[in-house]
Image: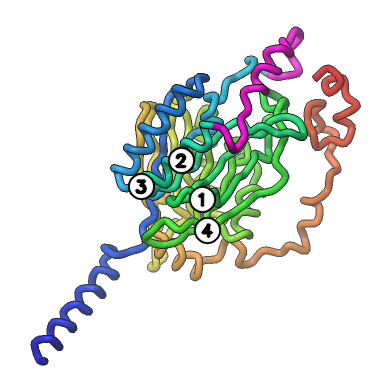
C-alpha cells in the first residue's frame, strides 16, 4: 500500500510538472499549405491530396488551403474592371462555369480524405450558385468527414474579377473537435482582412482562431493588418497564400504580453516565397487564460455608439460605380454592361 501511495504521488507530481512546463498543454496545430497556383482542377485535387497527407505526417490537426484552390484563383484580367474596354464576356462565362457544387468529385474527394487521414481540412473553391453568380467559398471538414462550416467571402473584390461572383451574407464560426480538444474556428477570405468588422464579428460569435485563405501579395502592411486583427480581438489568425504570389503565409497569436506584463512577440511564423508546408502551433490554454485577464476583444466595447456602422449611406468621396453597397449600383453603366 505504501508503494502504491508513493507511486500515485509521483504520478500526480509529474502530471502537475508537465502541465506547468507546457508538455501537456492544449496545442492546436494548423498546416499552412503554401502551394503554387494552377487552373487545372484535376491537378489541384492530386496536389491537394499529397499536401494533406504530408500535413498529417507533420502532426497537423487541420490543413488550410489558399483561396479558391479549385481553379487556382484564375485571374480574368489585369488592372481594374472599370478600365476593361473590351472585356471578353465569353471568357467570364467560361470562368463562372468552372464553379462546382458540394456533390462534385473535388469536394467528395477531400471529405473522404479528411475521414481517411483523420485530419480536418479547410478546402477552398469557386462554388456553384443556382440563384446567380458563383461564390468564393471555404468549407471546413472535420476529421470524421463532417462539414462543420461553409463560408462565402463577404467582401468580394468588386473592382476586379470577383465582380462576377456573389458576395456572402454572414460570417460564421464552428466548434472543431480535433481529437486532443476542441476549438472555436472562424473563417475570413483574403480581402475580408481589410475590414475590421470581419474579425470583430467572428470574435463576438466566439472564434478563438480565424483561418484566412488568401490569393494576393502579402505586403508588409497586410501582415501588420493580420497582426492587429489578432491583437484587438484576442484570437489567433492563420493566413495561407500561394507560393507564386510570393507566399508569406503567416500566423499570429493574440498574446502580446505575459503574466508579468512583459512584451511578447505575437508572430508565430511568416513563411518565405517557397512552396511548402509550415505548422503553426496555437497554445489554446495560454490564449484562453490571456483572454480572461486582458482588456481587448469584447471586454469594454460600447455597441450603443456604433449605430453608424450599420448605415448604407456612403460619403461621396468613397463612392465607386462598381461597389455593390452603393444603392445606385444597379443603375450604373458598369452594371448594365456586366
Q: Of label 4 and label 1, which has the lower sequence position?
A: 1
Residue 93 falls inside the magenta stretch: yes
CA gap between label 2 and label 3 equals 10 Å
Q: Position of residue 230 (x, y in %)?
A: 52, 51
Relative horizontal placement of residue 304, taking residue 252 as reference (left or right): right
Q: Secondary structure at mark 4?
A: strand
State whether residue 234 appears in this view: no
Q: Of label 3 and label 1, which has the lower sequence position?
A: 3
Q: Quadrant of residue 332?
A: top right
Q: Judge the density around disc 4: few (<14), some (14-19), many (≥20) Cα neighbours within 10 Å.
A: some
CA gap between label 3 and label 4 equals 17 Å
Relative horizontal placement of residue 316, taking residue 124 as reference (left or right): right
Front: mark 2 or 1: 1
Q: Which residue is tagged 1?
A: 146
Q: Judge the density around disc 3: few (<14), some (14-19), many (≥20) Cα neighbours within 10 Å.
A: many
Q: Secondary structure at mark 1?
A: loop
Name the residue rendered at 57%, 21% in the picture: 74
Magenta region: 80-104
Quadrant in which the N terminus is drawn: bottom left
Q: Which residue is tagged 2?
A: 64
- 87 over 311 or under it: above or below: above
Quadrant in which the C terminus is drawn: top right
Q: Which residue is tagged 4?
A: 175
Q: Secondary structure at mark 2?
A: strand
Relative horizontal placement of residue 22, taking residue 149 as reference (left or right): left
Q: Position of residue 79 (x, y in %)?
A: 65, 17
Q: Secondary structure at mark 3?
A: loop
Q: Of label 2 and label 1, which has the lower sequence position?
A: 2
Q: Of label 2 and label 4, which has the lower sequence position?
A: 2
Q: Position of residue 140 (x, y in %)?
A: 52, 46
CA gap between label 4 and label 1 equals 12 Å
Q: Judge the density around disc 1: few (<14), some (14-19), many (≥20) Cα neighbours within 10 Å.
A: some
Amino acid at each position: 500500500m505504501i508503494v502504491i501511495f508513493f507511486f500515485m504521488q509521483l504520478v500526480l507530481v509529474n502530471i502537475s510538472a508537465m502541465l506547468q512546463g507546457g508538455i501537456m498543454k492544449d496545442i492546436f496545430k494548423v498546416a499552412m499549405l503554401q502551394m503554387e497556383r494552377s487552373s487545372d482542377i484535376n491537378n489541384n485535387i492530386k496536389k491537394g491530396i499529397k499536401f494533406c497527407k504530408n500535413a498529417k505526417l507533420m502532426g497537423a490537426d487541420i490543413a488550410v488551403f489558399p483561396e479558391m484552390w479549385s481553379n487556382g484563383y484564375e485571374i480574368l484580367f489585369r488592372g481594374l474592371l472599370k478600365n476593361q474596354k473590351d472585356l471578353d464576356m465569353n471568357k467570364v462565362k467560361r470562368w463562372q462555369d468552372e464553379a462546382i457544387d458540394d456533390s462534385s468529385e473535388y469536394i467528395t474527394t477531400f471529405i473522404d480524405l479528411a475521414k481517411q487521414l483523420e485530419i480536418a481540412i479547410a478546402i477552398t473553391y469557386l462554388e456553384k450558385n443556382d440563384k446567380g453568380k458563383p461564390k468564393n467559398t471555404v468549407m471546413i471538414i472535420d476529421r470524421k468527414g463532417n462539414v462543420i462550416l461553409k463560408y462565402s467571402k463577404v467582401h468580394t473584390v468588386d473592382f476586379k474579377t470577383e465582380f462576377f461572383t456573389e458576395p456572402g451574407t454572414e460570417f460564421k464560426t464552428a466548434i472543431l473537435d480535433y481529437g486532443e480538444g476542441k476549438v472555436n474556428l472562424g473563417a475570413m477570405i483574403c480581402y475580408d482582412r481589410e475590414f475590421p468588422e470581419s474579425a470583430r464579428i467572428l470574435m463576438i460569435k466566439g472564434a478563438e482562431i480565424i483561418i484566412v485563405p488568401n490569393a494576393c501579395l502579402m505586403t508588409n502592411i497586410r501582415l501588420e493588418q493580420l497582426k492587429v486583427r489578432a491583437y484587438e480581438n484576442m484570437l489567433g489568425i492563420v493566413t495561407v497564400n500561394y507560393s507564386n504570389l510570393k507566399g508569406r503565409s503567416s500566423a499570429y497569436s493574440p498574446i502580446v504580453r505575459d503574466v508579468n506584463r512583459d512584451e511578447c512577440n505575437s508572430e508565430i511564423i511568416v513563411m518565405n516565397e517557397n512552396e511548402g508546408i509550415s505548422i503553426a502551433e496555437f497554445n489554446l490554454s495560454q490564449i484562453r487564460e490571456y483572454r480572461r485577464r486582458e482588456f481587448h476583444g469584447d471586454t469594454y466595447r460600447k455597441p450603443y455608439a456604433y449605430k453608424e456602422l450599420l448605415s448604407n449611406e456612403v460619403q461621396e468621396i468613397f463612392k465607386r460605380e462598381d461597389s455593390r453597397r452603393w444603392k445606385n449600383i444597379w443603375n450604373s453603366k458598369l452594371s448594365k454592361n456586366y
